[in-house]
Amino acid sequence: MLDGITDRVQRARRIAARATVLPLLIRGGIGMAFLLALVVAWSETLVLGRAALPLALMAAYPMFAPRGIAPTAAALAVVAGWILDTTWYDAPIALWRVLAIATLLYLGHTLAALAAVLPYDAVVGAEVAGNWLLRAGGVVLGSAVLTVIVLGVSTELTGPAFLLATVAGLAAAVGLALLLARLLRRT
């Protein structure tokens, strides 16, 4: 058991000695994105109370293991907090919170994807992260605009029209996923 701990300590020292700035900044961005998402999603009483340390650790976990289940676990913690806050604590559903949570989750997820393929000691230019974040910003902006438009249209729909629009939207999403899967199999 001590050999395993000693090996991990030596590995951590080796990583710390060889690490470069940009991969560490990207990993810090992962932690910051998930931490802000947790703060926006969870109730104020829990974030400022006894749940503060576990939530901070949950946000930091993907920084150290971006390839594994850590980003998914952090995202599920954010979603659980949102559901708990809006159902148990009866917090109002505000558009700014929905957009902020979606933006921060996407940012944490996409930075985790970049960190998963970027070694600690990689020497890369700042334009790599800049272009990555620029593309992520485009996705976030497009999603936010589409969300506002769809919410504006859905307030006009009631009864059977709302159900029809929901089924049509789900069918379009499934159809697009199948089309993309088929196109990916061709290449």
Image (cartoon, helix red, strand yellow):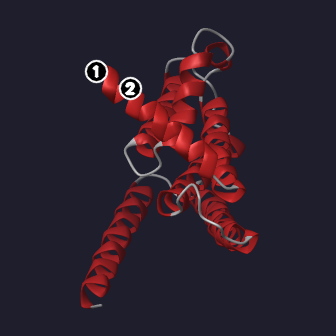
From the viewer's side, name the closer residue of 121 and 61.
121
Residue denoted by label 1: 1
Residue 79 against residue 159 in the figure, above or below: above
Please state the total of marks drawn on the protein image.
2
Q: The N terminus lies in which quarter of the figure?
A: top left
Q: The C terminus lies in which quarter of the figure?
A: bottom left
Please give the name of the residue rendered at 68% of the width and 37% of the height, measured from the top-left corner.
36
Q: Residue 78: x percent and y percent?
A: 52, 35
Please give the name of the residue rendered at 60% of the width and 33% of the height, measured from the top-left corner.
38
Q: Which corner quadrant of the image does residue 13 belong to?
A: top right
Q: Residue 67: x percent and y percent?
A: 41, 52
From the viewer's side, name the closer residue of 76 and 55.
55
Picture disc at residue 5: 2
Q: Amino acid at mark 1?
A: Met
Q: Residue 62: x percent and y percent?
A: 51, 42
How far, Cα to Cα, is label 1 from label 2? 7 Å
In the rendered image, is residue 105 in sight?
yes
Q: Is residue 87 left or right of residue 40?
A: left
Residue 6 against residue 142 in the figure, above or below: above
Please give the name of the residue rendered at 67% of the width and 56% of the height, measured from the top-left corner.
20
